[in-house]
Image (tube, grey):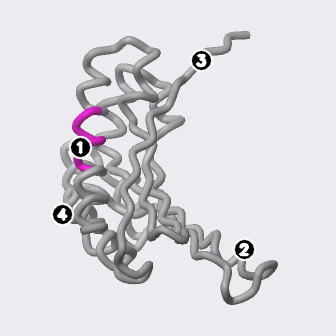
Amino acid sequence: MAIRQVSVERFSVTSSKPFEEVVRAIDAGVGHPEMNAFLKSIATARTFAELADVVRHAVGPSDLMEFARFDLGEVLSKDRGPDAPRLLRLVAGNPVTMKKMAEHVPDAGSYAPITILIDERPDGVHLSYDRMESLLAPYGNRDASKVAKDLDSKVEALLVAAAS
């Protein structure tokens, strides 16, 4: 049995824009492929180059695509009513980027795709992301860390743009 301590850096930015506007901005930055068709295309790709081409057509301007969306605010509203704060978890990423990290640090597969959390608080809409570079730092692999740092930059730029 092995236990590894992982310290996480959380990047957060707060927006004064309405929740819906922030979500629309995030949605505009990430791709939204039809997942069944996307997964079928990935499965039928014969080479990594073909797979990369499928991914290239699925991602948005941020080089990310949405895999799943969890409306946690809907759950909160069942208990707290219509005034419950909105809370949305987006699972996003890029399979090619994940491959570039996981080939050096297989545990990267535990952290990719990434989560973007968008939540409403009294002081504004918070957009948060756990930095991949911090998650992979304990593994000490420079190649994986370089890819993670690039991913962090893309996600953080998306969040800042959506908040501005």
> In this orientation, does residue 40 appear?
no
Which numbered disc flags the more N-terminal residue, 4 or 3?
3
> Between residues 120 and 150, which one lies in front from this camera angle?
120
Q: Can you say whether 135 is above or below 45 in the image?
A: above
Q: Mark 3 belongs to which amino acid?
A: Gln
> Is disc 2 surrounded by few (<14), some (14 to 19) or many (20+) residues within 10 Å?
some
Residue 27, which numbered label? none
Cα distance between the residues tagged 2 and 1: 31 Å
> Is disc 4 surrounded by few (<14), some (14 to 19) or many (20+) residues within 10 Å?
few
Q: Can you say whether 52 is above or below 27 in the image?
A: above
Q: Mark 1 belongs to which amino acid?
A: Ser
Q: Mark 2 belongs to which amino acid?
A: Leu
Q: Quadrant of the N terminus?
A: top right
Over which residues does the magenta segment extend?
A: 149-154
Q: Secondary structure at mark 1?
A: helix
Residue 61, which numbered label? 4
Residue 76, which numbered label? 2
Residue 5, which numbered label? 3
Cα distance between the residues tagged 3 and 2: 31 Å
Q: Residue furthest right?
A: 79
Q: Looking at the magenta stretch, what is its main secondary structure?
A: helix
Which numbered disc flags the more N-terminal residue, 3 or 1?
3
> Between residues 153 and 103, which one lies in front from this camera angle?
153
